[in-house]
Amino acid sequence: MEKYELQKLRDLPIEGVAERLGLQVSRHKCLCPFHADNHPSLSFKVSKNTYRCFVCGASGGTIDLVMKYLNKPFREACQWLADENNLIINDDRFKVNGSGFKVKEKPFDASRYERFFERPWLNEEARRFLFDERRLDPRVVRWCRLTSWKDKQGVPWLQIPYYNREGKLVGIQNRNLVRGALPRFRFPQGSQCGIYNLPVLNLLRPGEQLFITEGCSDCWAMLSAGHKAIAIPSATLLTKKDVEILESLTMNHESLTVHMYPDRDEPGERLFLQLQKVLPSLVHHQLPLGCKDFGEYYTLKIKH
Ligand SMILES: [Zn+2]
């Protein structure tokens, strides 16, 4: 990655980056996600494009904020920022960061995590989230090998494994099960959480429909509704590898049709248009009024 490209990531408006992360910015301030904050003590300096918390001292620029908030190493934080902002970064040249030292990242160590998904276990919080709130089909939860754990602080996490098409574990997304708690997601080092539920592609029969959803929870809802589905990450830009996978779908399965219920908002429609460039035959379905995404449609209208 060239210095020039890094600078582009550093120059992204910091308040916009904070909002993309889910922080609520108001008058150049927000609640600090890095300590227990109940009065906004993290402030943004627009002129310098930086943030600083006057209580815990957390500070930095756009890349630091993403690294710290998403618990991602430098390179992944840059990738996240690039994806969120339709920038393309060149992987091969991504060796030196702006200050000149080498950034080397450890690859994802699947052997450390595989056993967690061999005998999935759902704690009370996970069962409440998956079955009471989302009303998912237990068969879907088993197929996705969702499991749960609690960290040292007692915070319950849902552990979501990402497999490639060959069924190899390539990444893990941890979702915080405490409503409204931060960080919402955590990814073990090197996790490649691109397209979700790729193994389902091996089960597609000629003439079948495949649905594309945004994010895992809509994918689980779609599967629970009896459809075959994959999810693309919430990042609005796909990596080159993801694009290749999507393009190969219609090339290898001529009779396959690909469908989508875009979220009922502007980003949802934008995403549909982006995907349509990759999959020109993508079929648009409209969610009924009052349903913002397929997950909501499923819990409100389909499952009773
Ligand atoms: Zn703080």
Image (spheres, rainbow, N blue to C red):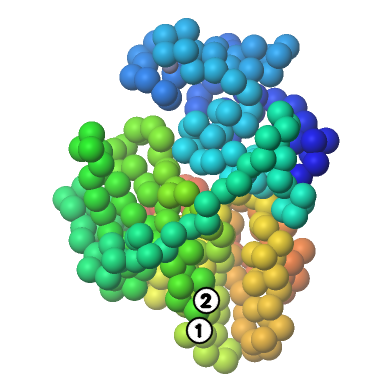
| Mark 1 closeness class: few <14, some 14–19, many ≥20 residues within 10 Å | few
Residue matched to label 1: 202
Report helix, strand or loop for mark 1: helix
Between disc 1 and disc 2, the foreground one is 2
Q: Quadrant of the C terminus?
A: bottom left
Residue 217 quadrant: bottom left
Decide if residue 296 is on the left or right side of residue 242. left
Is 60 placed above or below 223 here? above
Do tag 1 and tag 2 residues touch (Cβ < 8 Å)?
A: yes
For the point 43% across and 49% down, the residue is 188
Q: Residue furthest right?
A: 4
The residue closer to the viewer here, 133 or 286, is 133
The residue closer to the viewer here, 222 or 42, is 42
For the point 47% across and 38% down, the residue is 71
For the point 75% across and 71% down, the residue is 280
Decide if residue 32 is on the left or right side of residue 85. left
Q: Give the residue type at disc 1.
A: Asn
Residue 128 circle label: none
Image position, residue 223 (x, y; %): 41, 70
Image position, residue 108 (x, y; %): 48, 57
Residue matched to label 2: 165
- Quadrant in which ligand 1 is drawn: top left
Q: Give the residue type at disc 2.
A: Arg
Is 64 placed above or below 292 here? above
